[in-house]
Amino acid sequence: MIWMLQILITTAEPQVPCYFIFGDSLADNGNNNALATQAKVNYPPYGVDFPGGIATGRFTNGENAADILGKLLGFLNYTLPHATATGPEIVKGLNYASGGAGILKRTGRNLGEHINLDLQLKHHGMIVSKIMSLQGNNATFTKDYLSKCIYTVGMGSNDYINNYFMPDKYNTSKRYTPDQYADLLIHKYSRQLESLYIHGARKVVVFGLGLIGCTPAKVSDFGANASGCVDKINAAVTLFNERLKPIIDELNNKFGSAKYIYINTTNISLGDPSSIGFTVFWAPCCKPSVDFGKGQCKPNQPPCNDRSKYIFWDGFHPTEKVHMGTASRAYIAASPLDSYPMDIRSLALLKL
């Protein structure tokens, strides 16, 4: 794991006028707080390293990758969660991400309420209409404005964690082989990514899936192979990622006025984690609860003392330090394999 931890945070004007975030718990910044769901974390020790030590609903100890990318893009304030945003600040962008959400509508229902990707996109369509109203109902101006913004999408983890590899709750693993399931997901996902273009997006960042078979919760559920991870889960995720990258080319060929890019999250996570100070690779920093959202932190229990040494914060989610590495290498690729066909900084500066 070769992280680029030296991040340059600009204090100049943002590189893009607005920043919209679609995703799951890796990017959720409070959208689930008022929902009837196990997938919410607005309680300590979450947020112990966030400014003010506040448990905002982020599934980590501090900032997540979406927050850090916002800083790298030059935004001084955090992108607001859609659930609580009101007024003219929506023109700077919103975060629609929701813990438990997936590409498929049925994904994550075992956890309770959540905002799946279809619903996130529906909410965004309504927000675009509100932005147009705020900008004087000038469709041409709003279209040009939105075309300069950055849109990030990270989906699919829950379609495996809280669907395919949960045979006691879902029958998808009985109905589909891993290849067939990856095809099913990609077919729907490509249409969802197309809908962003319809709503005015022209600079779209699509994050691939990480090695979710290495999460402490999945290793606990299935048992580790010689690799230390659950190989069958990582193999299934690889099938999804292998199909996702070609979709980027298809979308770029179909929409000549847009640029979609792919972030290879798996490649970013490969390497030797000890080279940058990680010493605890498999155990979570906090004490996981077995009855309060399995894999999430047990409420109000103190976490490990030195979070910088841990890869995992809880049973599923990385620590802020890992989020920092992901965001920095997505923004400026440290390897040609990190992003395709360009990194986020290049996309932000691209003139379309």
Image (tube, rainbow, N blue to C red):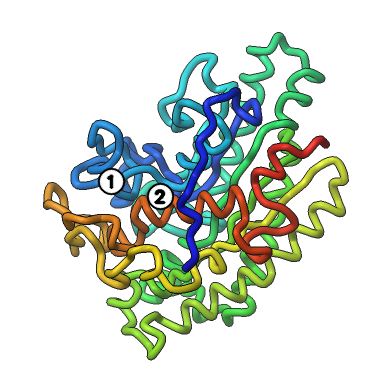
Residue designated by label 1 = 41
Residue designated by label 2 = 99
Badge 1 marks a residue whose secondary structure is loop
Q: Residue at x 25, y 69 (%)?
A: 283
Which residue, as the protein is rendered here, is positioned at the far bottom? 226
Badge 2 marks a residue whose secondary structure is loop
Q: Quadrant of the C terminus?
A: top right
Q: In this view, does 225 lie to the left or right of 149?
A: left
Q: Which residue is drawn at 40% across and 69% down?
A: 275
Give the amino acid at mark 1: Val
> Whole-percent x and y of residue 188?
66, 58
**CA–CA distance between discs 2 and 1?**
9 Å
> Whole-percent x and y of residue 337?
65, 66
Give the amino acid at mark 2: Gly
- Name which of mark 2 and mark 1 comes first in the sequence: 1
Q: Residue at x 16, y 55 (%)?
A: 305
For the image shown, how many numbered marks are present on the structure? 2
> Whole-percent x and y of residue 147?
75, 32
